[in-house]
Amino acid sequence: MLMNIQPMEFFDEVVNPDLDEVSALMRANWAPPCWLYERDLLAMHIMRPTADPTMAVGLRAKSGELASYLAFVPMRLRVEGRIYKAVFASFFTVSGNFRRHRLSDRQQGLMVDRARDHGYEVYTAVTVAGTPANQTVARAFGARGLPVRAAHNFRYLAGAGAIVSSRLAASDTGHVRTYAPSDEGTAFALLSAAAARAPLAHVVEREDVDFYLRSRPRIKTYVYEDEGRVLGLMSVSLLPVLSGRVGLNAYVEALALGRLDPAARTAFVDTVLRSVLDEGAEAIMVPDTGCGDLETFRRLGFRAAPRKLRLLLAPLRADVTDLPEAVDGFCLDVF
């Protein structure tokens, strides 16, 4: 009797694989609507000054094909006043050619163990509610006796370009200008103050600021200046998005408006959004994580996007026992 026995496939761990190869893996396996993570978009996060590319790892089949990939981006994370050595997990992708090999669980477990071996204390990630990634994360931590909690549920606010543009006030060219390297110190203070108000936040590193706001690709950063003082900051990425066709979205990366009065805040946001729409953005996205006041965006017709997201939070060590079950808001890069 003939038996249909599938050959066993072996996989090699590959540290920091070429980002063009990673981009190709994502393009082939992510379902639209999704951003097109090309090399430069991946490098925005994985290659920042305080990042660690050795925490971006894939599994390669013997055929040479990159079969899966997951990046843990290091950070210092403040949770309710305590600072942890943490990672943010992102870009998780498994090739459909290898689904029967349970690579999702293998890749997650590999990276959890790698983070533990490197002395990290806390894991964070953002997932889409109801997707299998939530179960693979839970299994990876459960196998190590560690709990995972969904600490905060949220959505993006989305603004259609045509609606937003019809509601914008005139540009405030007297106060709004592009970010310059000389703004780095003030920008660090503004971003740190914005993050300090959230119960869970990425601790802003001074050496990352200029890269984060100016040097990395596809980023445009603006400041609001009054009598020589920079009082507000807004940073936007222009990202290619695939949803039936390739378009262009604007994505609000950083927002620090706390020193602006309501009129200045409105003028600043309107001026920046007019600029990015003039760049060809068809829609604008801002994560509604509870980190900042987004009423200015709602006034412009921004509405909650349908996709439900959740912030996952988990200890990487058994002695980290004081993480909250939930937080009211958080201030993190969401990518």
Image (cartoon, rainbow, N blue to C red):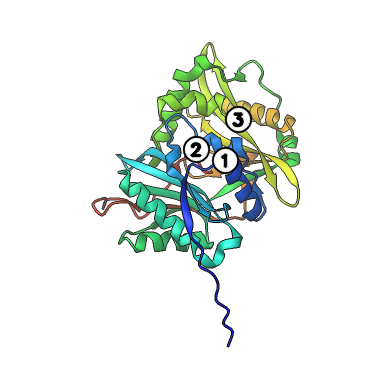
**Could you tell me which residue is drawn at 40 percent across and 44 percent down?**
87
Q: Disc 2 on helix, strand or loop?
A: helix
Residue 46: image tag: 2
Which residue: 49% across, 45% down? 289
Q: In 3D space, how far apart are the residues under numbered discs 2 and 3 (Cα atoms)?
A: 13 Å
**What residue type is disc 3 on?**
Pro
Q: Which residue is mark 3?
A: 217
Task: For mark 3, give the secondary structure.
Answer: loop
Residue drawn at 55 percent across, 43 percent down: 287
Report the number of numbered marks.
Answer: 3
* Residue at the extreme front: 1
CA gap, disc 3 to disc 1? 14 Å
> Looking at this rendering, what residue extends furthest in the top direction?
227
Give the mark, 3 or 1, whose residue is nearer the N terminus: 1
Q: Position of residue 262 (x, y in %)?
A: 55, 29
Give how far across and how far down residue 273 sits, in percent.
Answer: 66, 31
In the image, taking residue 85 as reference, residue 6 lies left or right, namely right
Residue 321 percent across, percent down from the top left: 26, 53
Q: Are marks 1 and 2 in contact (CB under 8 Å)?
A: yes
Look at discs 3 and 1 and give the one toward the viewer.
1
Q: Nearer the viewer, mark 1 or mark 2?
A: 1
Residue type at mark 2 is Ile
Q: Amino acid at mark 1?
A: Leu
Classify residue 28 as left or right of residue 57.
right
Residue for badge 1:
19
Q: Earlier in the sequence, mark 1 or mark 2?
A: 1
